[in-house]
Amino acid sequence: MIATRKIVQDALKIDEMVFAFECICPDDNKNPEDYTDTELVNEAEYRLFTYYESGHINNDDMRLGDDPISRKQAQTDIRKLKSFIKKYKTEDGYYSSWLKQVGQSVK
């Protein structure tokens, strides 16, 4: 897939966002280019939240992963998601109400 918008190009550089697109695009009958910037940032926020959600496989990979490759990939995705959100988020500096609950911010 060739993305024309910079935000989509950046999202496609994040493995977790590529996985998200593989899941949501068919359900929504859309391509990544069809989502608004706000929708892309919201999806990135949700994906980041899953790394802090107890019981989610992303949280398990980050915290309990026996596989060092999975743990390193989780850390890489977290860093890239935070960077993406910081770059494209236009509101109050906090990700969303989900991450406010766990005290995570861009700062």
Image: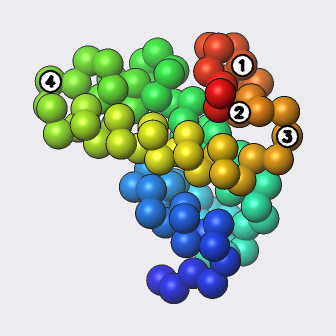
Three-letter code for the amino acid on which mark 4 is drawn = Asp
Q: CA distance from mark 4 to mark 3?
A: 37 Å
Whole-percent x and y of residue 7? 65, 66
Marks 1 and 2 close (CB-CB < 8 Å): yes
Provide the residue designation for mark 1.
100
Say which residue appears at 54% left-offset and 65% top-offset: 10
Considering depth in this image, is 21 or 41 the residue closer to the camera? 41
Report how far apart the C-alphas of labels 1 and 4 lie in the structure.
29 Å
| Residue 95 badge | 2
Q: Is residue 95 above or below residue 98?
A: below
Residue type, label 2:
Tyr
Horizontally, is 107 left or right of 19 in the view? right
Q: Which mark sits nearer the N-terminus, 1 or 2? A: 2
Left or right position of 87 against 13: right
Q: Which comes before the other along the chain, label 4 or label 3?
A: 4
SS assignment at label 1:
helix
**Figure colour scheme:** rainbow
* Residue picked out by circle 4: 66
Q: Is residue 76 above or below residue 2?
A: above
